[in-house]
Amino acid sequence: MSSENEQGGGGGEEAPPEQLALIREAVRKAKVPKAKPRTWRGAALAKELPVARVLVDKGVLHLDRYFDYAVPEELAAVAQPGVRVRVRFGAGGRTVRDGRREGGSLIDGFLVERVAESDYSGPLAALAQVVSPEPVLGPELLGLARAVADRYAGSLADVLQLAVPPRHGRAEAGKTADPLPAPAAPEPGSWRRYARGAEFVQSLASGGSPRAVWTALPGPDWAEEIARAVQATLASGRGALVVVPAGRPAARVDAVLRGLMGEGRHALLTADAGQERRYREWLAVRRGAVQAVVGTRAAMFAPVRNLGLVVVWDDGDASHSDDNAPFPHVREVLELRATRDKCAFLLGSWSCTVEAAQLVESGWAAPLVAEREQIRAAAPLVRTVGDGDLARDEAARAARLPTLAWQAVREGLRHGPVLVQVPRRGYVPRMACAQCRAPARCRHCAGPLEAHDAGALRCGWCGREDAAWHCPECGGFRLRAQVVGARRTAEELGRAFPAVPVRTSGREQVLDTVSGAPALVVSTPGAEPVAEGGYAAALLLDGWAMVGRPDLRAGEEALRRWIGAAALVRGQAAGGTVVVVAEPTLRPVQALVRWDPVGHAVRELAERAELGFPPVSRMAAVSGTAEAVTGFLSGVELPSDAEVLGPVPLPVTEVGRPRRVGGPPPGERWERALIRVPPGSGAALAGALKTAQAARMARGGGGGGNGSEAPVRIRIDPPDIG
């Protein structure tokens, strides 16, 4: 309003003095300049560090870099490194007004840093909005996310989507409690059962950073042992991070920690908690209110301050491998954190993966195991039922339940519940020698051989046919792909023991615990509930379906599943018995009988080293349509020591059926090629694949959108390579 109007001139109707006073007061209180927040056109820039480097949340490889934006003066105070922002993106240089780039769509991002000058010579767009002044992306988390993105040939934005939970305003506005003083160092407790267990806990309490691969004794004490390791680390003034495969084990560790240290010393980060509670707990960790975290997969990125210990339990569980790009694995991420933060590392399980054995063999970690006397005292008695026993057993042929298993169930029900483990549907066995059960492998690349409709054998990796296969172990020529064991397990057991209640635990309903009363508990692998006082006996049925799956890890996974179930059974001294229906000569069965998962992993590692299998070598899977895969492979500059296997067709996903992770869309025919490199070339392979994929996306393909080229999917170290 002009001064003439204020004085009543200009021929206009004179406004009442009171109204003019209100207008003048409103003008004095208005913020200057009145720039549009969308573009901040006309607004002054920040006097110090006027340029913000932003990571835009696009998640495509050719945009995996920082973009510079101008910082308006009004946002200078809140536009700090680590905050969430919104920016204009995609307009190009077509629309420039008053020296400020405009246009484009609003997208989210993270402000990474503030600098004095931009490397870009043209006009900059301004930050559109600071979503929240809460700095959620610290330099430690940013560095870890970048290392993970480079290792898995992914984008930094995709990793941060996994690492930083979605914002919740109410949780962010809430106050965070003050941190509690460090607890007292705990007694070693049941860690004394291991040869160097007490020494491990004492090292943590004194500020040490030991690295160990821990083979836990059977029984429920594993959760308390992890909790004591966490308490010892907190007693030294450092933080701790524990990652478990699912919500049930997370709840067990959470309960033990509350019992040992009380409330307010740790956070529980699981997907079941809900968005608000999970973000509130995550903020408490980031703000330093708590120094310990227990959680599932996404917790591997938890921003624990002064990290002193990282723990991963049961690293062989498939839940530890993320289903979203770039598909990081908890074990590998925590190894990176232990190396970057120079903190302690504990990999624990009842079983032992080949990767864990490699950590020990390389000297990166030390073994933490019990003496054989302790193992024999804690483990149940394991008995086997092989094909020969089934052929001679009239009861097994009639009822599909071996006599030995029936007797073990009958005896176990006198003293408590009995666990029955049955493989899930869809376990398709791979081809093996009918005489010695050795897996049928390709003579060129050692991949698994598959039988097709025409009867010819073809490698599942390189696609070569083998019409003259014979077993290199025994010289046999016959193959086997039959599943032997009980199929109607629950029905047969219900008929055999009509007075005993039968409970099931599986996909539809997973039980957490069962009472110690006599009952039959039929469960799929991984869904076994914990019995009060332990199970009196366990049956592990259809063992051939577990060992014979067409997967490199079939034997390792079968042993892990069996030991996971058998560890819930009472010790041999208390009468605990386990019956496994599988050929006793198989290596995983022998390892179960001896309760020697470490020996099995060491022998498996030696065999993989001889054949060039992971984890001794690094592998990448490239999948897509035949034309897309061929075109991608022709354009990528692979390391000189890389070996390409395939491509071979992938199973077609039927319309209406659940889609496997990494599988083709329903109805589409895809192929997959495997790229193998020796140790030391993994980073070069990931870099080459990332560069080629970024160039392909820049041309409009590979991302699964509306580009001119069909998408190509890349997965480093795929868990299921056949």
Image (cartoon, grey):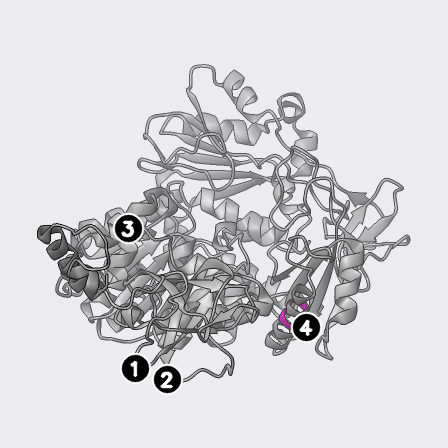
**Residue type at the position of mark 3:** Gly
Tags 4 and 1 in contact by the CB under 8 Å rule?
A: no
Mark identifier at residue 48? 1
Query: What element does badge 2 sit on?
Result: loop
Mark 4 and mark 1 lie on one chain; the one further toward the N terminus is: 1
Mark 4 and mark 3 lie on one chain; the one further toward the N terminus is: 3
Q: Which residue is mark 4?
A: 677
Q: Nearer the viewer, residue 37 or 583?
A: 37
Residue 541 vertical placement versus 41 (above, below): above
Residue 709 visible in the shown view: yes
Q: Main secondary structure of the magenta part?
A: helix
Q: Which residue is mark 3?
A: 169
**How many neighbours does mark 2 have within 10 angstroms: few (below 14), some (14-19), or many (20 or more)?**
few
| Measured Cα–Cα span from mark 3 to mark 1 | 29 Å
- Span colored in magenta: 689-693
Q: Nearer the viewer, residue 414 or 110?
A: 110
Residue 512 location, quadrant: top left
| Measured Cα–Cα span from mark 4 to mark 1 | 49 Å
